[in-house]
Amino acid sequence: MTAPTLVTVSSPDFRIGTEVMLASFRATNPWFDGDILVFHSRLSETDQTTLADAFPRLSCRTASRRLVAAIDALVAAHPYLGGRRDRFLSLETLLLGGPGKRIFADSDLLFRGDISSLFASDASLVAAPDAAMLRGNQRDADTLAEVAAEGEARASFNAGLLVYDPDPAMADALWPLLDPAGWSRIASQHTDQAVWNLLLRDRVALVGTGFNLMIGHRAASFAHEAVPVADARVLHFNGAAKPWRPDRHADAIARDPAYAEALRLWAAARADWLRSRA
């Protein structure tokens, strides 16, 4: 099997998260020997050098001109997206050339187990359910609004961890979904995740929540699958309460006391990483 490529998105305020995500991935998935691509728009030269020196086969890149232009046009038409524009950089995963599957991993993930089993599927995309499915609901096919499930719910997924088998047709189909006029119909608050779902929701193989346990939705997710924090292979610190933002920890723990357990695991992984670099 051709080695997969690991892709993430980083920024100055996420670089610490990127380091912990990559270090925990390498520690728990020693089979991985592929390239690591970090897409960004604002990392300093120092940040880029720090990441490249720390992880073998890592390179930092800006997105392609066409994608940057499409994002700029979308944000100009919908200014509320401006503070989240970098999230759209994950879509560069769809445009990469070369063989092998792609692993897209958000920089706010913590890997705690092997994910190689995700490569057993022949599906175009492997992902875990999104918050709507975890609450027992579904997404409207056109607007992606969360609605009550009727009959067999159509799949919708979180884009924090994806295993993607490249398809040139998907790269071509990307551009109409970034059309500013068409974006007006999107009723969810998602950015890149909306595009991923519109492209691949009919071609996704859903896996258990343990492969992407969203800490911000954990307390509300048990309608779908109850996964203890300690049992998850991947923890996802979705939402505003990032582990490297201590000013937001108290509110996160008040919403779900299990956040404290997840935070301890992240802090331990960060400490292990720093000790290994000393």
Image: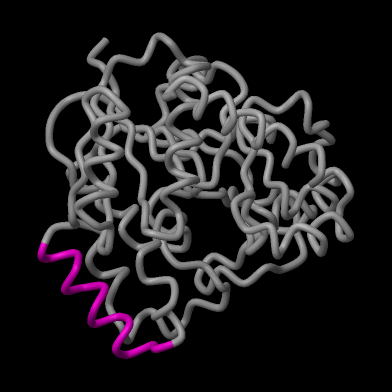
Magenta-drawn segment: 65-79
Q: Is residue 254 above or below residue 163?
A: below
- Residue 232 spot, x, y in % from top left: 70, 28
Principal SS element in the magenta part?
helix
- Residue 241 spot, x, y in % from top left: 67, 59
Q: Is residue 46 above or below residue 210?
A: below
- Residue 258 spot, x, y in % from top left: 85, 43
The residue at the point 49 percent across, 36 percent down is 21
The residue at the point 55 percent across, 40 percent down is 109
Residue 110 placement: quadrant:
top right
The residue at the point 21 percent across, 44 percent down is 60
* Residue 62 left/right relative to 201: left
| Quadrant of the image containing the N terminus | top left
Q: Nearer the viewer, residue 215 or 159?
A: 215
* Residue 256 left/right relative to 184: right
- Residue 68 spot, x, y in % from top left: 19, 68
| Image color mode | one colour
* Residue 208 left/right relative to 220: left
Q: Nearer the viewer, residue 63 or 254?
A: 254
